[in-house]
Amino acid sequence: MRGHLALTCAADVDGRSYLSRQSFNAPFHLSKPYWDGSVLTVKMVNPTAGLLAGDSLRCCLKVETGARLQVTTPSATRVFTMAEASAQVDQHLQVARGARLAFLPSMLLPHRGSRYRQKTRIDVEDGGELFYVDTIAPGRVAHGESFAFAQIDFETELFFDGRLNARERFRLRPDDASLQPLRALHPQAFWASCYLVTDRLTDEHPALDRIRELHRADVWVGLSRLSLAGWSLKIVAPESWPMSQTLAGLRQILADALPVFVLPNNR
């Protein structure tokens, strides 16, 4: 499949966020957007079984000044077994000054022998806010598949006001040393990478201490300041449930500290 999704979220004269532009085709599908009085929530749905060899998807999201958008997915993205070709997802997220975007997809679930490449560019203007999450499962653990995929390739670039703020690139393969750091922590490690950009939190804000307190013996949480603006957060958990609990705790902390931006899990 050659799928695309393009959304622009704007604010009307009353400050209500709405989709001023939307275009998509299979395998992308959108649920009906929901405005709760503070944030517009959109669920991206893949009505097919998942990603297959040769699939190429492009997702472009733009949030204009004054608009507040949360994008989620209702279930994990499955990447199926592939003989040779890979599945590729390209993402471009744009957040204007005075706009807020929370991009919170469910975890990526690679099946045995799958190949997946994801390339993401994020542009945040000064005064814009971003909360971005990527989560990767080691595989179908209940089926005895842990790190049995062929290759996962991730590339993420975060620009702040036109300047490079963070760059992350990694390639995971079970037949080389790339998985050793994860396996050293947990045999079936779940991994998450988050980026938070906001000017409403200072380095001394108690919310950052609450985030650091999510770290414990079995779940590793690391928080680092980015060079220009915001923070990078990494999480490694031994199973799906501790990862979900930690991400839910993170969302609650940010919902408390940044109202009308990050919503807790039940919203």
Image (spheres, grey):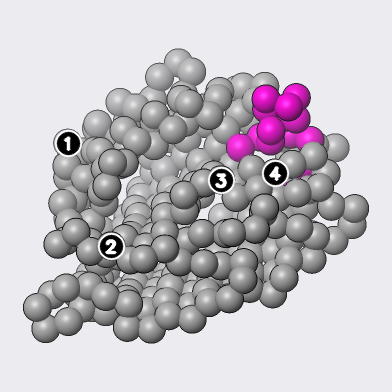
The Cα atoms of the two marked residues, 2 and 4, are separated by 30 Å
Which image quadrant for residue 101?
Answer: bottom left
Residue 248, label in figure: none
**Which callout, 1 or 2, points to the residue nearer the camera?**
2
The Cα atoms of the two marked residues, 3 and 2, are separated by 21 Å
The relative height of residue 254 versus residue 246 in the rendered view (above or below) is below
Residue 206, label in figure: 1
Where does residue 113 sit, x and y in percent of width and height?
83, 44
Give the mark nearer the N terminus: 3 vs 2.
2
Pick the residue in front: 36 or 238. Answer: 36
Residue drawn at point x = 47 percent, y = 31 percent: 243
Where does residue 125 sit, x and y in percent of width and height?
31, 74
**Which callout, 2 or 4, points to the residue nearer the camera?**
2
Give the mark nearer the N terminus: 1 vs 2.
2
Does the magenta-highlighted stretch encompass residue 138? yes
Q: Please rate how many residues cluster around mark 2, counting C-alpha atoms within 10 Å: few if below 14, some from 14 to 19, many from 20.
A: some
Q: Which residues are magenta?
A: 137-152
- Residue for badge 4: 110
**Which callout, 4 or 1, points to the residue nearer the camera?**
4
Q: Please rate how many residues cluster around mark 4, counting C-alpha atoms within 10 Å: few if below 14, some from 14 to 19, many from 20.
A: many
Q: Secondary structure at mark 3?
A: loop
The relative height of residue 69 versus residue 219 in the rendered view (above or below) is below
- Residue for badge 3: 76
Residue drawn at point x = 75 percent, y = 49 percent: 80
